[in-house]
Amino acid sequence: MSDPFDKMVSDARTVFEASASKPLRDAWASLSLPQIRADLIQRLSVAGIGEAESDARFLLAHVLAPSSYADAVADPALFSWQQMSGLADLAWQRLERRPVSQILGSQPFWTLDLLVTEDVLTPRADTETLVELVLEKCAPGVADLVDLGTGSGAILLSLLSERSDWSGIGVDLSPAALEIARQNARRCGLDDRARFVEGSWGASLAANSVDILVSNPPYIRTDVWRGLEPEVRRFEPRQALDGGEDGLRDYRSLLIDAVRVVRPCGLVAVEIGFDQGADVTALFEQAGLDDVGVKRDLAGHDRVVYGAVAGTNG
Ligand code: GLN
């Protein structure tokens, strides 16, 4: 085979034939779209995936876009062999328990759509409670914000999207996470007000340099982390989840920085695990924060602890 084009096609075919999702393509080759959907749901359920039906819906919507599933059922020409093959690739990753957010590459959070990879925690709806709390406590007006352990940048960027006169810094230990956060800032049109800095909690920040400090630190106890579902344990960064033996390690570290970095009367607000309200409240009080409170998420669980840095005379 001397023709370079023929060689390219043949090489591509070899790679394709060897690809992991071949068993799915073979199984689906002679099935209709509804049959493929049913088979996909069945395989996801057998793999132990609880949300098999909605996961199948997300994967199908992704490969069929801009057509809908109903359109493609009505008109089989809208579901090409390439799309079936693409669906097989996505489904294979899901069967290996990669989270849907990482397979599709993005995740909605607040009003934003954020890029997500293995290098960052997928933003959770629970974390919107922290965004809400900060917006409740802080009226519009110029303010400097910092998000410690920013990951994808979800909290920082959501807050900047709501307050056009705020500027913010996202800090993270992971350069790979910071790269995703920077891309998200550009994607959301917020890169003129967001900066990203590599560092451990607030160590790289000057004293009295911000008005608002937020964080969703790792807070899962190590023994609990070991028992988490494969989606989280195998595919999300342990560094963003494992909060040490008692799950409180990173609150202790970041509070030391918070009282130094946040200006008098400024706000400190952190996400917590559902059973950490009392412990983290006690840590905030020990750190000397005033007006310490807890906010619940939509499920009624304690989800955010907040407090004010003492004023100059108090
Ligand atoms: N809420 C996340 C989870 O349940 C944990 C996030 C964190 O440790 N900060 O997986």
Image (cartoon, rainbow, N blue to C red):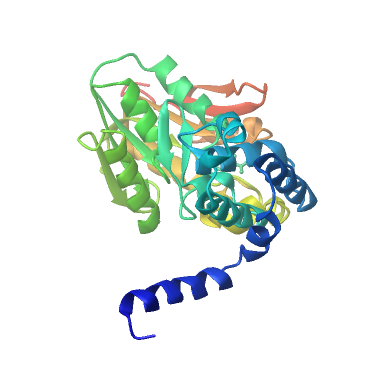
Image coordinates for residue 186, horizontal then vertical, percent? 27, 40
Q: Can residue 244 be spotted in the picture?
A: no
Q: Is residue 39 left or right of residue 103?
A: right
Indicate the quadrant where residue 238 lies.
Answer: bottom right
Residue positioned 65% across, 54% down in the render:
97
Above or below: residue 26 compared with residue 47: below
| Residue 272 percent coordinates (x, y) | 58, 35
Residue appearing at x 41%, y 72% in the figure: 9
Where does the image place residue 257, in percent across and percent down from the top left?
A: 39, 43
Asked whether 232 or 290 is in front, the reply is 232
> Ligand 1 sits in which quadrant?
top right
Q: Observer-nearest residue: 247 or 8?
A: 8
Front one among 82 and 189: 82
Q: Residue 145 placed where, x, y %?
A: 31, 32
Residue 85 visible, this angle: yes
Q: Quarter holding the N terminus?
A: bottom left
Q: Between 196 and 86, which is closer to the camera in this rendering?
A: 86
Image-quadrant location for residue 79: top right
**Residue at image location 69% in from the left, 39% down from the top:** 34
Q: Is 161 placed above or below 247 here? A: above
